[in-house]
């Protein structure tokens, strides 16, 4: 009984994040940046010198898993993508 009470309290303390639909279409830098903007992630912002997300992504896309990055459910999940 105590175990279920603890689980219920833990779940009540962590409200679910916003419902975000997965990005449709191919995994591209535009799709990843659009997803990040939809979630309000800092990664979608321009760099301090004004470089847009898509340009930064295009420099790194051969190293990034764009499929993973364009379908994250939270900003924190970006770091978990290879």
Image: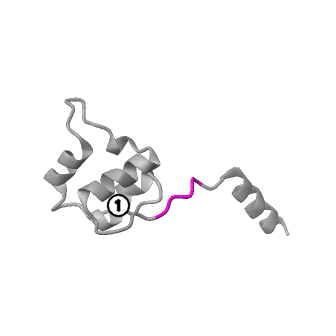
Say which residue appears at 73% left-offset and 55% top-offset: 12
Q: Which residues are magenta?
A: 17-21
Which residue in the protein does label 1 denote? Answer: 70
**With respect to residue 48, does 9 lie above or below?**
below
Residue 50 occupies quadrant: top left
Q: Quadrant of the C terminus?
A: bottom left
Say which residue appears at 44% left-offset and 44% top-offset: 40
Where in the figure is residue 63, as x and y percent of width and height?
18, 61
Where in the figure is residue 1, as x and y percent of width and height?
85, 69
Circle count: 1
Q: Is residue 48 left or right of residue 18?
A: left
Where in the figure is residue 33, as x and y percent of width and height?
32, 51
Residue 44 occupies quadrant: top left
How packed mark 1 is, by other alpha carbons closer than 10 Å (few <14, some 14-19, many 20 or more), is many
Residue reaching furthest right?
1
Q: Any magenta on residue 18?
A: yes
Residue 43 occupies quadrant: top left
**Of residues 20 and 73, the one drawn nearer to the viewer in this rendering:** 20
């Amino acid at each position: 009984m105590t175990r279920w009470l603890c689980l219920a309290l833990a779940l009540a303390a962590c409200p679910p994040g916003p419902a975000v639909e997965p990005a449709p279409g191919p995994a591209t830098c535009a799709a990843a940046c659009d997803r990040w903007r939809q979630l309000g992630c800092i990664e979608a912002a321009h760099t301090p010198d004004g470089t847009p997300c898509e340009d930064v992504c295009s420099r790194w896309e051969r190293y990034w898993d764009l499929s993973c990055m364009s379908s994250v459910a939270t900003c924190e999940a970006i770091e978990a993508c290879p």
